[in-house]
Image: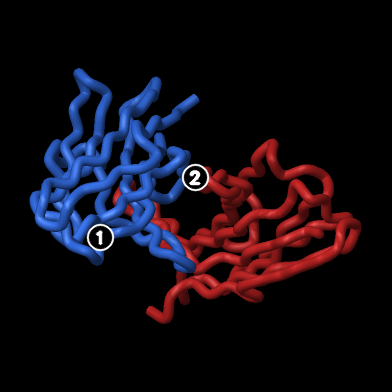
Amino acid sequence: DTGVSQDPRHKITKRGQNVTFRCDPISEHNRLYWYRQTLGQGPEFLTYFQNEAQLEKSRLLSDRFSAERPKGSFSTLEIQRTEQGDSAMYLCASSRGLARVTDTQYFGPGTRLTVL
Amino acid sequence: AQSVTQLGSHVSVSEGALVLLRCNYSSSVPPYLFWYVQYPNQGLQLLLKYTSAATLVKGINGFEAEFKKSETSFHLTKPSAHMSDAAEYFCAVSDQGGNEKLTFGTGTRLTIIP
């Protein structure tokens, strides 16, 4: 396994701009998750995919946020009209997605977003 | 709704001393519980997980945790702290195992005193 990768690792943007992050899961992992982690807090669930289908979205995912996984492989998370409150670490994780409780989520290194 | 509470946002122990990081959960269904570790500028790494097979769970790097239903706890321990254990530790809960969303605690930063 090459691990979950995320790009970019750091992003600085001005308020009102749009940003897009990419996540490449571990090969053959069917499930892909997005979390957000703010300073001093634990990660908070945003959304997850089973292959290309988006199965659940958190209330944290406002209309300005959109996530896609078009071919069931990599995923993108876009934030439109960024606000300073969007500054956070965005974490991606993947798992095999088998119907087993012993499944494990493997996390990427995250993308740190700073909105000025 | 499920939740976990981590008591103590910062814990300091001397090298070689016992490490004890506390986690209490709240769940209306039998929970699945996890401990993750996060080193600076890195993603989260799974230390161990409880999936009802055994109440005492052994993980990587010498860590273990015991599920106590009567106390709704899942505390993380290590008999002898090492300098490399300095990191942030997160407890998490899920009602469907590892292939569903995780709900994390606020984390405990562990500092090792030489």
Q: Which chain is blue?
A: B
State whether residue B106 appears in this view. yes
Chain letter of the residue beneath label 2 in the structure image: A
Q: Which residue is mark 1?
A: B85
Q: Is A43 on the left-hand or right-hand side of A53? A: left
Instruction: Relative to A57, say whether B5 is above or below.
Output: above
Residue at screen point 14% across, 50% down = B78
Residue furthest toward the front? Answer: B114
Residue in front for this viewpoint, A109 or B16:
B16
Badge 2 local density, few (<14 within 10 Å), some, or many (20+)? many
List x then y, in percent, for residue A83. 82, 50
Q: The disc labelled 1 sits on which kind of residue?
A: Asp
Q: How many marks?
A: 2
Is B77 displayed left or right of A115 in the figure? left
Q: Which mark is residue A42?
A: 2
Query: Which one is in front, B107 or B10?
Result: B10
Q: Residues within 10 Å of mark 1 (few under 14, many from 20)?
A: some
Image x and y of residue B103, in percent: 47, 39
Can you give x and y, in whole percent of width and height, for residue A92 in the image? 55, 61
